[in-house]
């Protein structure tokens, strides 16, 4: 019987010829360098994919921001913002009224008692610590009695000033326009 598979029975190491620089580089590239080239290629592909995903997310965020900005600038939203601001100012006014030392009804009652006969009141406004009254008077003596009433007869008001006096004779009437401000005294 003939054996077709002959094995090499040479037990000595192969002797290789000395290699040159090109052979060393060639051998190193095909043993180790190809793995480095493949790894760098994979890193470039992964970076490209992440850059593509990040660009998509950025463009989506910019689109959402522009959409929200257009909603905020719409007339309906501006109307809602105005309503909310109005509610906030009303709530602030209510909280300021709650911090008053006297109840507004007491203050109005005292004002009505202090106004003499020749004085007409056109507006009264409350702040946290003071009031402002404006209107017309028939004569300067009526304004003097108004000032005296607020200074001498009231326990609620102090620092009474009448900073604005205008004679409306130029407007074809003999009334004197005035405004009065007074601080509200804090209860002890």
Image: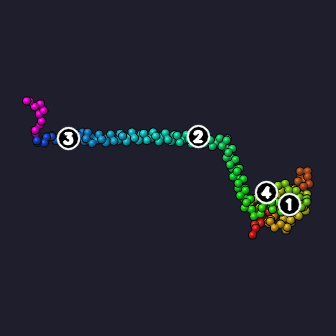
Between the residue at mark 2 and the residue at mark 1, the CA separation in whole angstroms equals: 56 Å
Report the quarter where the C terminus lies: bottom right
Residue position for label 4: 125
* Labels 4, 3: front one: 4
- Residue 19 appears in the picture as rendered: yes
* Labels 1, 4: front one: 1
Between the residue at mark 2 and the residue at mark 4, the CA separation in whole angstroms equals: 43 Å
Relative to 146, say whether 51 is above or below: above
| Residue at the (13%, 32%) spot, across then down | 5
Which of the marked residues, 2 or 1, is nearer the chain's N terminus? 2
Residue position for label 2: 67
Locate residue 179 relative to residue 15 in the image: left or right.
right
Estimate the x, y position of residue 11 in percent, counting from the top left.
10, 41
Which of the marked residues, 1 or 4, is nearer the chain's N terminus? 1
Estimate the x, y position of residue 43 in percent, counting from the top left.
37, 42
Closer to the camera, 5 or 82? 5
Q: Are marks 2 and 4 in contact (CB under 8 Å)?
A: no
- Residue 176 appears in the picture as rendered: no
Residue position for label 3: 20
Which of the marked residues, 2 or 4, is nearer the chain's N terminus? 2
Q: Are marks 4 and 3 in contact (CB under 8 Å)?
A: no
């Amino acid at each position: 019987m003939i054996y077709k598979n002959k094995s090499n029975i040479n037990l000595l190491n192969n002797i290789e010829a000395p290699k040159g620089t090109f052979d060393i580089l060639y051998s190193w590239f095909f043993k180790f360098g190809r793995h480095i080239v493949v790894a760098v290629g994979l890193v470039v592909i992964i970076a490209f994919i992440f850059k593509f995903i990040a660009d998509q997310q950025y463009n989506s965020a910019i689109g959402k921001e522009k959409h929200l900005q257009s909603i905020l600038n719409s007339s309906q939203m501006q109307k809602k913002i105005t309503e909310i601001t109005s509610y906030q100012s009303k709530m602030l006014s209510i909280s300021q009224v709650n911090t008053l030392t006297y109840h507004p009804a007491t203050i109005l009652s005292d004002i009505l008692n202090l106004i003499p006969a020749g004085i007409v009141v056109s507006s009264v406004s409350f702040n946290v610590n003071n009031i402002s009254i404006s209107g017309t008077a028939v004569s300067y003596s009526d304004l003097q009695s108004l000032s005296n009433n607020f200074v001498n007869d009231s326990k609620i008001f102090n620092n009474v000033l009448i900073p604005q006096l205008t004679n409306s004779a130029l407007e074809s009437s003999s009334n004197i326009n005035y405004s009065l401000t007074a601080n509200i005294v804090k209860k002890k």
